[in-house]
Image (cartoon, grey):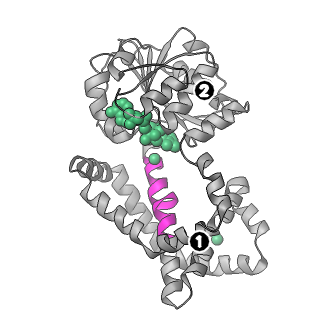
Amino acid sequence: MTDTPATTAPLAQARIAVIGYGSQGRAHALNLKDSGLDVIVGLRKDGPSWQKAIEDGFAVAEPSAAVAEADLVAVLTPDMVQPELYRTAIEPNIKPGATLLFAHGFNVHFGQIKPRADIDVVLVAPKGPGALVRREFEIGRGVPCLFAVYQDTTGHAEERAKAYAAGLGGARALLIRTDFKEETETDLFGEQAVLCGGASELVIKGFETLVEAGYQPEIAYYEVLHELKLIVDLFYEGGISRMLEFISETAQYGDYVSGPRIVDDATKARMKAVLTDIQDGTFARNWTEEYKAGLPNYKRLKQADLDHPIEKVGKALRARMPWLSATAPAAKPA
Ligand code: NDP
Ligand code: MG
Ligand code: MG
């Protein structure tokens, strides 16, 4: 744990260009501005974000113009558009000695972006979606941030990264030092093996098991998907011990004897294989090729998920639970 104190002082004279105004971009731009820093937002003129950033009170310019006048450029567009954005708008325009900042190390770590040698390159990655980064800042708190330095030509890279994290509110909570490799590989592994890939497949296989055994899909949906939130909330608040505290003895005993039958050492061995594909660049290469080819497999696999019976039954059930849609906007990227 790196609990390093930080203030925005090293960026007090800096102009910050935030490129992209989505989940992270909007939260970063607003928090930095409210921390007293000078922010310009870089966007394409024909995109839907342009008007939104203006309505929020920002100076907005095309990415190349925003970059040209900035001392720090935060790249907060989707990862797959960043290499082209770097080539066309950033590389030709960024000032020598300026700081190039990412919120995820993917493109730099896997060599999709090779930063110019005369700039600093850093990472500040809040450990939460943009809406939470904004909400916590507004109530005087902050979301913990990872920070890292990839390239330090000025000798000021680290203090500027920490100042940016302070501007987001992250220094009110916790700043953890990392490097681009660790941030990138652990982020990819988490989302693939556990959070997105692992959790959704676990739910789908559980649903199929119950439905194929003749149980009603509506009841299967509640048991394996809907109620997952209760468990995850307990994990989030107090780890596995808090979950064990709140579930019945019967559920605990079932957890102890059946959990390891479902997720066992063979699963862990496959997790290691997934990690190896991430570490040796196989995943990044496949994903980059897929993106360039127009996402044929991505679209097919996504459609298969959307067409799964659990989605049909889920849609009908959620329509009868109005409190779900009442809370949905807060959970979505702003
Ligand atoms: P989003 O998908 O929310 O970014 C969308 C924004 O990018 C929109 O404002 C869009 O503008 C803009 N954009 C898209 N293409 C371009 C382009 N070619 N030129 C200029 N602007 C463009 O991104 P996220 O906030 O999810 O992710 C940003 C970065 O943060 C990524 O590196 C991601 O890995 C990282 N990250 C994300 C987290 C999250 O919770 N989402 C958490 C931690 C890190 P338009 O309206 O014109 O389309
Ligand atoms: Mg990720
Ligand atoms: Mg268990």
Is residue 200 within the magenta segment? Answer: yes
- Spot occupied by residue 284 in the image (x, y as percentages of width and height): 31, 48
- Between 19 and 164, the one nearer to me in the picture: 19
What's the CA distance linking mark 2 and mark 1? 38 Å
Q: Is residue 89 above or below residue 190?
A: above
Q: Write down the residue under mark 2.
A: 31
Q: Secondary structure at mark 1?
A: helix
Residue type for callout 1? Leu
Please give the name of the residue rendered at 44% of the width and 57% of the height, measured from the top-left corner.
192
Q: Quadrant of residue 115?
A: top left
Which label sits on residue 55? Answer: none
Magenta-drawn segment: 185-202
Closer to the chain start, of discs 2 and 1, is: 2
Whether label 1 lies within 8 Å of ligand 3 gets the answer no
The nearer-to-camera label among 2 and 1 is: 1
Whether label 2 lies within 8 Å of ligand 1 gets the answer no
Q: Secondary structure at mark 2?
A: helix
Image quarter where the C terminus lies is: top right
Pick out the residue farthest to the left: 293
- Spot occupied by residue 54 in the image (x, y as percentages of width and height): 49, 23
Is residue 305 within the magenta segment? Answer: no
Please give the name of the residue rendered at 65% of the width and 29% of the height, measured from the top-left corner.
171
- Between 110 and 307, the one nearer to me in the picture: 307
Q: Quadrant of residue 71?
A: top left
Q: Is residue 201 above or below residue 89?
A: below
Q: Write down the residue under mark 1.
A: 317
Please give the name of the residue rendered at 22% of the width and 46% of the height, measured from the top-left corner.
292
Residue type for callout 2? Asn
Predominant SS along the magenta part: helix
